[in-house]
Image (spheres, helix red, strand yellow):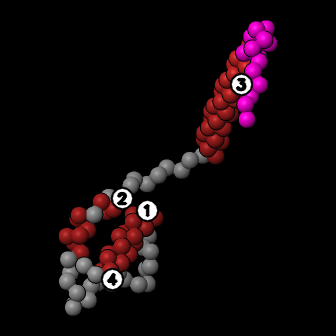
């Protein structure tokens, strides 16, 4: 199959999708083109093999209140997760600083404070 045939098939599928969604034809003044006689007319076999012909059911409109609620829930979940990250980060920092302070105090008490060699 040539790229021209694939293009024509894609255009036909797109127009069929538009018609199924809107109930109108995409181009009422221009009928769908048929393949040229010199080209093989094997579109039906290809159309049956492609899963893009399965059209989704028409989506129901979503009210603004539902969108706001969904956005609010997502923002709240994001904020809670960020606060949990922040708490974990502070707890880790405090634990590491406590270990450093304890090691420094032990070193100061024992007089074990070697100078670093360079």
Mark 3 packing: few (<14 Cα in 10 Å), some, or many (20+)? few
Residue at screen point 32% across, 80% down:
3
- In the image, 57: left or right of 94? left
Is 51 colored magenta in this rendering? Answer: no
Q: Nearer the viewer, mark 3 or mark 4?
A: 3
**Which mark, residue 58?**
none
**Which mark, residue 4?**
4
- In the image, 51: left or right of 42? right
Which of the two residues, 34 or 4, is positioned nearer the viewer here? Answer: 4
Q: CA distance from mark 1 to mark 3?
A: 56 Å
Q: Nearer the viewer, mark 2 or mark 1?
A: 2
Mark 1 packing: few (<14 Cα in 10 Å), some, or many (20+)? some
Which of the two residues, 3 or 101, is positioned nearer the viewer here? Answer: 101
Is 107 colored magenta in this rendering? Answer: yes
Going from N to C along the chain, the mark reached first, 1 or 3, is 1
Going from N to C along the chain, the mark reached first, 2 or 1, is 1
The spot of residue 69 in percent (x, y) is: 63, 38
Which of the two residues, 7 or 111, is positioned nearer the viewer here? Answer: 111
Residue marked by disc 2: 55
Residue marked by disc 1: 21
Going from N to C along the chain, the mark reached first, 2 or 4, is 4
Secondary structure under tag 4 reads: helix
**Which mark, residue 93?**
3
The answer to whether the residue labelled 2 contacts the one labelled 4, judged by CB atoms less than 8 Å apart, is: no
Going from N to C along the chain, the mark reached first, 1 or 4, is 4
Quarter occupied by residue 117: top right
Q: Which residues are magenta?
A: 103-118
């Amino acid at each position: 199959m040539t790229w021209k045939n694939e293009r024509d098939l894609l255009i036909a599928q797109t127009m069929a999708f538009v018609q199924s969604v809107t109930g109108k034809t995409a181009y009422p003044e221009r009928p769908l083109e048929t393949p040229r006689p010199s080209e093989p007319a094997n579109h039906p076999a290809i159309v049956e093999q492609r899963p893009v012909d399965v059209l989704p059911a028409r989506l129901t409109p979503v009210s603004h209140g539902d969108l706001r609620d969904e956005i609010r829930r997502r923002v709240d979940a994001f904020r809670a997760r960020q606060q949990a990250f922040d708490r974990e980060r502070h707890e880790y920092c405090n634990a590491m600083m406590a270990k450093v302070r304890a090691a420094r105090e032990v070193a100061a008490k024992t007089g074990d404070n070697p100078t670093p060699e360079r």
